[in-house]
Image: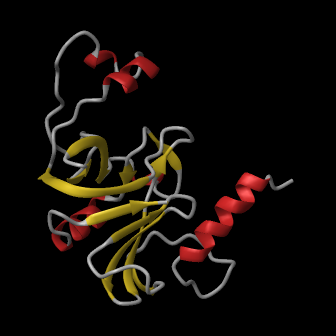
Amino acid sequence: MLSRRAFLASSAAASIWPQIGSAETVFDPTPQEVRIKKEFAPGQILVLPRSYYLYYVTEPRRARRYGVGVGRAGLEFTGTAVIQAKKEWPTWRPTDEMIERDPRSYARFVDNKYIQPGGTDNPLGARALYLFQNGIDTYFRIHGTNQPQTIGHSVSNGCIRMTNEHIVDLYERVPLGTVVTVL
């Protein structure tokens, strides 16, 4: 049974959802040019976690769509942020909350300040776009991944992940100051 909250949330999302050819679509993570509703200005990024897509608006009513992986239930980011930093082969350290939730998985980070260097073994992959709100780091990222099989799934600790090839493409397209909206 559909709850009132779920109905209202899906109705609100449908009013701004990018225009898609049919209601029944098969997930395809391959970057493609698609139509999008006119409410979104060129240069903005829109992420729709429930459909596992990120849209980079390229011109009025047009966007480049990428498949993404998103945060597990309760860990996902929603709202609007700005890309205030970009890094190639970024370093990484899990947040204290991540370590607390799963100390066994993050054992090498417990009780120290170790930061994993960038590279192919790094969970942030080839590139990272750092999301800020009001000049403050949200600790959420749009980044690559060394686990491409997670694209199209809700498995991360909240970040939006893309294949390394796709994040490199997006990284080259978006400047600092790009507005990102996650619904």
**Nearer to me, 128 or 39:** 39
Viewer-proximal residue among 81 and 34: 81
Q: Residue at 42% across / 16% down in the picture?
A: 104
Q: Is residue 113 above or below residue 48?
A: above
> How many numbered marks does the figure carry?
0
Q: Quadrant of residue 34?
A: bottom left
What colour-coding does the image apply?
secondary structure
Q: Residue at x 56, y 64 (%)?
A: 51
- Picture layout, residue 24 above or below residue 10: below
Q: Position of residue 50 (x, y in %)?
A: 57, 59
Front residue (pair 120, 74): 74
- The quarter of the displayed image where residue 41 is located: bottom left
Query: Which residue ends up furthest to the top in the rendered image?
Result: 111
Q: Is residue 173 left or right of residue 41?
A: left
Residue at far front of view: 134
Residue at 29 percent across and 13 percent down: it is 110
Picture coordinates of residue 25, whole percent (x, y):
63, 77
Q: Is residue 127 above or below residue 100?
A: below
Name the residue furthest right: 1
Task: Examine the rendering and report whether any part of residue 30 can be seen.
Answer: yes
Q: Is residue 102 visible?
A: no
Point out residue 54 in the picture as x, y percentages from the top left corner: 41, 67
Residue 180: percent from the left, percent from the top? 33, 62
Which quadrant of the view contains residue 84? bottom left
Relative placement, left or right, of 161 versus 82 is right
Residue at image coords 41%, 18%:
100
Image position of 24 (left or right of 13): right
